[in-house]
Image (cartoon, rainbow, N blue to C red):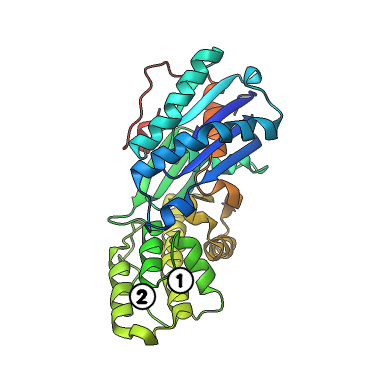
Amino acid sequence: MIYFEGPLLALETSCDETSAAIIRGRRVCSNAVASQIALHGKWGGVVPEAAARAHVEALVPTIREALDEANVTLQDLRAIAVTNRPGLIGALSVGLTAAKAMAHGLGVPLLGVHHLEGHLCSPLALESEIPFPHVCLIVSGGHTELVLVKALGDYTIVGETRDDAAGEAFDKGARLLGLGYPGGYAIQQAAVGGNPSRYPLPKGLSGDTIDFSFSGLKTAVLRLTEKQGVSLDIQDAAASLQEAITSVLVERAIRACRQLDASALTLVGGVAANLALREKFTLASKREGIQFFTPPLSLCTDNAAMIGLAASWRLARGESHDGSLDAYPNADLAAGA
Protein backbone atom coordinates (compact mmCIF):
# COMPACT_ATOMS: atom_id res chain seq x y z
CA MET A 1 0.00 0.00 0.00
CA ILE A 2 1.29 3.46 -0.95
CA TYR A 3 0.71 6.40 1.38
CA PHE A 4 0.67 10.16 0.81
CA GLU A 5 3.99 11.63 1.90
CA GLY A 6 2.42 15.02 2.60
CA PRO A 7 2.54 16.71 4.89
CA LEU A 8 -1.23 16.68 5.11
CA LEU A 9 -3.40 18.47 7.65
CA ALA A 10 -6.35 16.50 9.01
CA LEU A 11 -9.30 17.98 10.92
CA GLU A 12 -11.87 16.23 13.12
CA THR A 13 -14.94 18.01 14.51
CA SER A 14 -17.67 15.37 14.24
CA CYS A 15 -18.82 15.51 17.87
CA ASP A 16 -17.22 16.99 20.98
CA GLU A 17 -13.48 16.91 20.27
CA THR A 18 -11.75 19.59 18.19
CA SER A 19 -8.65 18.03 16.68
CA ALA A 20 -5.98 18.78 14.09
CA ALA A 21 -3.09 16.55 13.05
CA ILE A 22 -0.17 16.48 10.66
CA ILE A 23 0.47 13.18 8.88
CA ARG A 24 3.32 12.06 6.63
CA GLY A 25 2.64 8.63 5.15
CA ARG A 26 1.70 6.52 8.16
CA ARG A 27 3.63 8.71 10.60
CA VAL A 28 1.71 10.89 13.02
CA CYS A 29 3.79 14.07 13.32
CA SER A 30 1.32 15.81 15.63
CA ASN A 31 -2.17 15.24 16.99
CA ALA A 32 -3.63 18.21 18.87
CA VAL A 33 -6.96 17.72 20.65
CA ALA A 34 -9.11 20.33 22.43
CA SER A 35 -11.53 18.39 24.61
CA GLN A 36 -15.05 19.54 25.46
CA ILE A 37 -15.51 17.09 28.35
CA ALA A 38 -15.67 19.82 30.98
CA LEU A 39 -18.20 21.78 28.91
CA HIS A 40 -20.63 18.88 28.40
CA GLY A 41 -20.02 17.23 31.75
CA LYS A 42 -22.40 19.61 33.50
CA TRP A 43 -25.20 18.37 31.23
CA GLY A 44 -24.23 14.70 31.41
CA GLY A 45 -23.92 14.41 27.63
CA VAL A 46 -23.10 16.27 24.43
CA VAL A 47 -25.26 19.29 23.56
CA PRO A 48 -24.96 19.74 19.77
CA GLU A 49 -25.30 23.54 19.66
CA ALA A 50 -22.73 24.02 22.41
CA ALA A 51 -20.37 21.58 20.67
CA ALA A 52 -20.51 23.53 17.42
CA ARG A 53 -19.80 26.85 19.16
CA ALA A 54 -16.87 25.32 21.01
CA HIS A 55 -15.42 24.01 17.73
CA VAL A 56 -15.55 27.53 16.27
CA GLU A 57 -13.58 28.87 19.22
CA ALA A 58 -11.04 26.05 19.39
CA LEU A 59 -10.33 25.16 15.77
CA VAL A 60 -7.79 27.83 14.80
CA PRO A 61 -5.70 27.49 18.01
CA THR A 62 -5.77 23.69 17.61
CA ILE A 63 -4.56 23.91 14.00
CA ARG A 64 -1.74 26.22 15.10
CA GLU A 65 -0.77 23.77 17.83
CA ALA A 66 -0.63 20.87 15.36
CA LEU A 67 1.46 22.87 12.88
CA ASP A 68 3.87 24.05 15.56
CA GLU A 69 4.32 20.60 17.09
CA ALA A 70 5.12 19.12 13.66
CA ASN A 71 7.33 22.08 12.73
CA VAL A 72 5.24 22.65 9.61
CA THR A 73 3.86 25.85 8.10
CA LEU A 74 0.64 26.33 6.18
CA GLN A 75 2.68 26.76 2.99
CA ASP A 76 4.27 23.33 3.54
CA LEU A 77 0.91 21.53 3.42
CA ARG A 78 0.19 19.35 0.39
CA ALA A 79 -3.39 18.29 1.21
CA ILE A 80 -6.27 18.85 3.64
CA ALA A 81 -8.42 16.01 5.01
CA VAL A 82 -11.53 16.47 7.11
CA THR A 83 -14.28 14.38 8.68
CA ASN A 84 -17.44 15.14 6.70
CA ARG A 85 -19.62 12.17 7.79
CA PRO A 86 -21.29 10.98 9.99
CA GLY A 87 -21.71 13.18 13.07
CA LEU A 88 -23.45 16.24 14.47
CA ILE A 89 -24.20 18.35 11.43
CA GLY A 90 -23.31 21.66 13.08
CA ALA A 91 -20.06 20.32 14.43
CA LEU A 92 -19.11 18.71 11.11
CA SER A 93 -19.81 21.96 9.27
CA VAL A 94 -17.25 23.87 11.33
CA GLY A 95 -14.38 21.60 10.34
CA LEU A 96 -15.56 21.18 6.76
CA THR A 97 -15.89 24.92 6.17
CA ALA A 98 -12.37 25.52 7.46
CA ALA A 99 -10.94 22.64 5.42
CA LYS A 100 -12.55 23.85 2.19
CA ALA A 101 -11.30 27.39 2.72
CA MET A 102 -7.76 26.22 3.47
CA ALA A 103 -7.61 23.82 0.54
CA HIS A 104 -8.86 26.51 -1.83
CA GLY A 105 -6.50 29.15 -0.46
CA LEU A 106 -3.45 26.89 -0.58
CA GLY A 107 -4.37 25.25 -3.88
CA VAL A 108 -4.05 21.71 -2.50
CA PRO A 109 -6.32 18.64 -2.68
CA LEU A 110 -9.27 18.30 -0.31
CA LEU A 111 -10.55 14.94 0.93
CA GLY A 112 -13.63 14.18 3.01
CA VAL A 113 -13.27 11.17 5.32
CA HIS A 114 -15.85 8.89 6.94
CA HIS A 115 -15.46 9.12 10.72
CA LEU A 116 -15.71 5.36 11.20
CA GLU A 117 -13.13 4.71 8.50
CA GLY A 118 -10.88 6.98 10.53
CA HIS A 119 -11.31 4.71 13.54
CA LEU A 120 -10.85 1.64 11.37
CA CYS A 121 -7.56 3.03 10.00
CA SER A 122 -6.17 4.15 13.38
CA PRO A 123 -4.04 0.97 13.78
CA LEU A 124 -2.09 2.05 10.68
CA ALA A 125 -0.09 4.20 13.09
CA LEU A 126 1.40 0.99 14.50
CA GLU A 127 4.67 -0.25 13.03
CA SER A 128 3.18 -3.71 12.54
CA GLU A 129 1.65 -4.72 9.21
CA ILE A 130 -1.96 -5.77 9.72
CA PRO A 131 -2.99 -8.68 7.48
CA PHE A 132 -6.06 -8.70 5.24
CA PRO A 133 -8.74 -9.79 5.53
CA HIS A 134 -9.28 -9.12 9.22
CA VAL A 135 -12.16 -8.42 11.58
CA CYS A 136 -12.44 -4.95 13.13
CA LEU A 137 -14.58 -4.14 16.16
CA ILE A 138 -15.55 -0.46 16.14
CA VAL A 139 -16.90 0.38 19.57
CA SER A 140 -17.72 3.86 20.84
CA GLY A 141 -20.46 6.01 22.32
CA GLY A 142 -22.54 5.87 19.16
CA HIS A 143 -21.30 2.77 17.36
CA THR A 144 -20.80 -0.94 17.95
CA GLU A 145 -20.03 -2.77 14.71
CA LEU A 146 -18.05 -5.79 13.62
CA VAL A 147 -16.56 -5.14 10.20
CA LEU A 148 -14.90 -7.57 7.81
CA VAL A 149 -12.01 -5.61 6.31
CA LYS A 150 -11.03 -7.35 3.07
CA ALA A 151 -8.75 -4.43 2.15
CA LEU A 152 -8.56 -0.72 2.86
CA GLY A 153 -11.76 0.67 1.37
CA ASP A 154 -13.48 -2.74 1.14
CA TYR A 155 -15.68 -3.12 4.23
CA THR A 156 -18.63 -5.32 5.09
CA ILE A 157 -20.53 -4.89 8.36
CA VAL A 158 -21.09 -8.42 9.65
CA GLY A 159 -22.38 -7.69 13.16
CA GLU A 160 -23.84 -4.67 14.92
CA THR A 161 -25.90 -3.55 17.87
CA ARG A 162 -29.63 -3.92 17.47
CA ASP A 163 -30.33 -1.03 19.82
CA ASP A 164 -27.77 0.90 21.90
CA ALA A 165 -24.02 1.20 21.52
CA ALA A 166 -21.63 -0.15 24.15
CA GLY A 167 -20.38 3.36 24.94
CA GLU A 168 -23.96 4.49 25.54
CA ALA A 169 -24.37 1.63 28.02
CA PHE A 170 -21.24 2.80 29.84
CA ASP A 171 -22.52 6.40 29.93
CA LYS A 172 -26.02 5.51 31.11
CA GLY A 173 -24.66 3.05 33.68
CA ALA A 174 -22.27 5.66 35.03
CA ARG A 175 -25.10 8.18 35.42
CA LEU A 176 -27.24 5.65 37.26
CA LEU A 177 -24.34 4.88 39.60
CA GLY A 178 -23.65 8.57 40.15
CA LEU A 179 -20.20 8.40 38.59
CA GLY A 180 -20.36 11.29 36.15
CA TYR A 181 -19.30 11.83 32.54
CA PRO A 182 -17.73 10.45 30.40
CA GLY A 183 -19.06 7.11 31.58
CA GLY A 184 -16.44 4.74 30.20
CA TYR A 185 -13.54 6.25 32.10
CA ALA A 186 -15.67 6.79 35.22
CA ILE A 187 -16.72 3.12 35.26
CA GLN A 188 -13.15 1.97 34.66
CA GLN A 189 -11.86 3.99 37.60
CA ALA A 190 -14.68 2.98 39.95
CA ALA A 191 -14.30 -0.71 39.02
CA VAL A 192 -10.70 -0.98 40.23
CA GLY A 193 -10.65 -3.57 43.01
CA GLY A 194 -14.35 -4.32 42.58
CA ASN A 195 -15.92 -7.77 42.35
CA PRO A 196 -17.17 -8.26 38.74
CA SER A 197 -19.31 -11.23 39.80
CA ARG A 198 -21.13 -9.46 42.63
CA TYR A 199 -24.11 -8.36 40.54
CA PRO A 200 -24.99 -10.66 37.60
CA LEU A 201 -26.05 -8.52 34.63
CA PRO A 202 -27.45 -9.61 31.24
CA LYS A 203 -25.28 -9.85 28.14
CA GLY A 204 -28.06 -9.38 25.63
CA LEU A 205 -28.66 -11.71 22.72
CA SER A 206 -28.20 -15.44 23.18
CA GLY A 207 -27.23 -18.09 20.68
CA ASP A 208 -24.56 -18.18 18.00
CA THR A 209 -24.90 -14.51 17.04
CA ILE A 210 -22.33 -11.81 16.37
CA ASP A 211 -24.81 -8.98 16.91
CA PHE A 212 -25.13 -7.01 20.15
CA SER A 213 -27.88 -5.62 22.37
CA PHE A 214 -27.30 -3.33 25.34
CA SER A 215 -30.74 -1.84 26.05
CA GLY A 216 -31.60 -4.66 28.45
CA LEU A 217 -28.34 -4.11 30.31
CA LYS A 218 -29.18 -0.45 30.89
CA THR A 219 -32.59 -1.44 32.23
CA ALA A 220 -30.99 -4.06 34.48
CA VAL A 221 -28.65 -1.47 36.00
CA LEU A 222 -31.60 0.83 36.64
CA ARG A 223 -33.49 -1.98 38.40
CA LEU A 224 -30.36 -2.84 40.39
CA THR A 225 -29.98 0.71 41.68
CA GLU A 226 -33.68 0.88 42.55
CA LYS A 227 -33.62 -2.46 44.38
CA GLN A 228 -30.36 -2.00 46.26
CA GLY A 229 -30.72 1.69 47.06
CA VAL A 230 -28.08 3.01 49.46
CA SER A 231 -26.84 -0.53 50.13
CA LEU A 232 -25.52 -0.83 46.56
CA ASP A 233 -21.75 -1.33 46.46
CA ILE A 234 -20.73 1.14 43.75
CA GLN A 235 -17.29 -0.40 43.24
CA ASP A 236 -18.72 -3.88 42.71
CA ALA A 237 -21.57 -2.53 40.57
CA ALA A 238 -19.11 -0.70 38.32
CA ALA A 239 -16.97 -3.83 38.02
CA SER A 240 -20.04 -5.93 37.22
CA LEU A 241 -21.21 -3.50 34.55
CA GLN A 242 -17.75 -3.32 32.99
CA GLU A 243 -17.56 -7.13 32.97
CA ALA A 244 -20.96 -7.47 31.29
CA ILE A 245 -20.02 -5.07 28.49
CA THR A 246 -16.43 -6.11 27.87
CA SER A 247 -17.02 -9.85 28.03
CA VAL A 248 -19.74 -9.80 25.38
CA LEU A 249 -17.64 -7.57 23.09
CA VAL A 250 -14.74 -10.03 23.26
CA GLU A 251 -16.99 -13.08 22.92
CA ARG A 252 -18.73 -11.80 19.76
CA ALA A 253 -15.54 -10.50 18.12
CA ILE A 254 -13.71 -13.79 18.61
CA ARG A 255 -16.78 -15.65 17.33
CA ALA A 256 -16.78 -13.46 14.22
CA CYS A 257 -13.14 -14.33 13.57
CA ARG A 258 -13.98 -18.02 13.81
CA GLN A 259 -17.05 -17.76 11.57
CA LEU A 260 -15.22 -15.71 8.93
CA ASP A 261 -11.95 -17.63 9.20
CA ALA A 262 -10.06 -14.42 9.98
CA SER A 263 -6.62 -14.70 11.56
CA ALA A 264 -6.40 -11.10 12.74
CA LEU A 265 -8.57 -8.75 14.79
CA THR A 266 -8.43 -5.00 15.41
CA LEU A 267 -10.14 -3.08 18.21
CA VAL A 268 -10.82 0.62 17.62
CA GLY A 269 -13.01 3.48 18.85
CA GLY A 270 -13.43 5.34 22.12
CA VAL A 271 -14.36 2.27 24.17
CA ALA A 272 -11.14 0.62 22.93
CA ALA A 273 -9.38 2.83 25.48
CA ASN A 274 -10.90 0.74 28.28
CA LEU A 275 -7.98 -1.10 29.87
CA ALA A 276 -10.02 -4.08 31.00
CA LEU A 277 -11.31 -4.54 27.46
CA ARG A 278 -7.83 -4.33 25.95
CA GLU A 279 -6.55 -6.91 28.43
CA LYS A 280 -9.44 -9.30 27.71
CA PHE A 281 -8.85 -9.03 23.97
CA THR A 282 -5.12 -9.61 24.36
CA LEU A 283 -5.66 -12.78 26.39
CA ALA A 284 -8.53 -14.14 24.27
CA SER A 285 -6.72 -13.52 20.99
CA LYS A 286 -3.59 -15.22 22.24
CA ARG A 287 -5.63 -18.20 23.41
CA GLU A 288 -7.34 -18.46 20.00
CA GLY A 289 -4.17 -17.93 17.97
CA ILE A 290 -5.50 -14.68 16.48
CA GLN A 291 -3.26 -11.67 15.82
CA PHE A 292 -4.58 -8.69 17.77
CA PHE A 293 -4.00 -5.01 17.06
CA THR A 294 -5.29 -1.89 18.79
CA PRO A 295 -4.03 1.69 18.45
CA PRO A 296 -2.44 3.65 21.30
CA LEU A 297 -4.88 5.24 23.73
CA SER A 298 -4.42 8.67 22.14
CA LEU A 299 -5.84 7.35 18.85
CA CYS A 300 -8.89 5.60 20.34
CA THR A 301 -11.09 8.57 21.18
CA ASP A 302 -12.03 11.02 18.41
CA ASN A 303 -8.89 12.57 16.94
CA ALA A 304 -7.62 14.00 13.66
CA ALA A 305 -4.64 11.64 13.33
CA MET A 306 -6.94 8.74 12.49
CA ILE A 307 -8.65 10.92 9.86
CA GLY A 308 -5.27 11.70 8.34
CA LEU A 309 -4.30 8.03 8.30
CA ALA A 310 -7.54 7.16 6.47
CA ALA A 311 -6.90 10.00 4.02
CA SER A 312 -3.24 9.17 3.41
CA TRP A 313 -3.76 6.04 1.31
CA ARG A 314 -6.76 7.50 -0.50
CA LEU A 315 -4.83 10.65 -1.45
CA ALA A 316 -1.90 8.50 -2.59
CA ARG A 317 -4.12 6.81 -5.15
CA GLY A 318 -5.38 10.13 -6.46
CA GLU A 319 -8.70 10.57 -4.66
CA SER A 320 -9.95 14.07 -3.78
CA HIS A 321 -13.13 16.14 -3.56
CA ASP A 322 -14.03 19.55 -4.92
CA GLY A 323 -15.59 22.55 -3.22
CA SER A 324 -19.07 21.02 -3.36
CA LEU A 325 -18.13 18.51 -0.64
CA ASP A 326 -20.92 18.45 1.95
CA ALA A 327 -21.43 17.22 5.51
CA TYR A 328 -23.78 14.34 6.33
CA PRO A 329 -25.15 13.36 9.76
CA ASN A 330 -25.57 9.75 8.63
CA ALA A 331 -23.46 7.71 6.22
CA ASP A 332 -22.94 4.02 5.52
CA LEU A 333 -19.35 2.91 6.09
CA ALA A 334 -19.63 0.18 3.47
CA ALA A 335 -20.78 2.68 0.83
CA GLY A 336 -17.22 3.97 0.38
CA ALA A 337 -16.11 7.54 -0.39
Q: Earlier in the sequence, mark 1 or mark 2?
A: 2
Q: Position of residue 171 (x, y in %)?
A: 39, 61
* Distance of label 1 from label 2 (alpha carbons): 9 Å
Farthest residue, direction top: 107
Amino acid type of disc 1?
Answer: Glu
Please state which of residues 41 and 143 is positioned toward the viewer in this rendering: 41
Q: Which residue is mark 1?
A: 243
- Total marks in image: 2
Whether residue 112 appears in this view of the structure is yes
Whether residue 3 appears in this view of the structure is no
Q: Position of residue 293 (x, y in %)?
A: 58, 50
Answer yes or no: do the residues labelled 1 and 2 have beta carbons within 8 Å?
yes
Q: Which residue is mark 2?
A: 201
Q: Position of residue 185 (x, y in %)?
A: 50, 62
Q: Position of residue 84 (x, y in %)?
A: 40, 31
Seen in the image, is 209 located left or right of residue 23?
left
Assign a secondary structure to mark 2: loop
**Quadrant of image for the N terminus:** top right
Q: How would you rate the neighbour count of disc 1 (Cα within 10 Å): few for under 14, some for 14-19, many for 20 or more?
A: many
Residue found at x 37% / y 55%: 45
Amino acid type of disc 2?
Answer: Leu
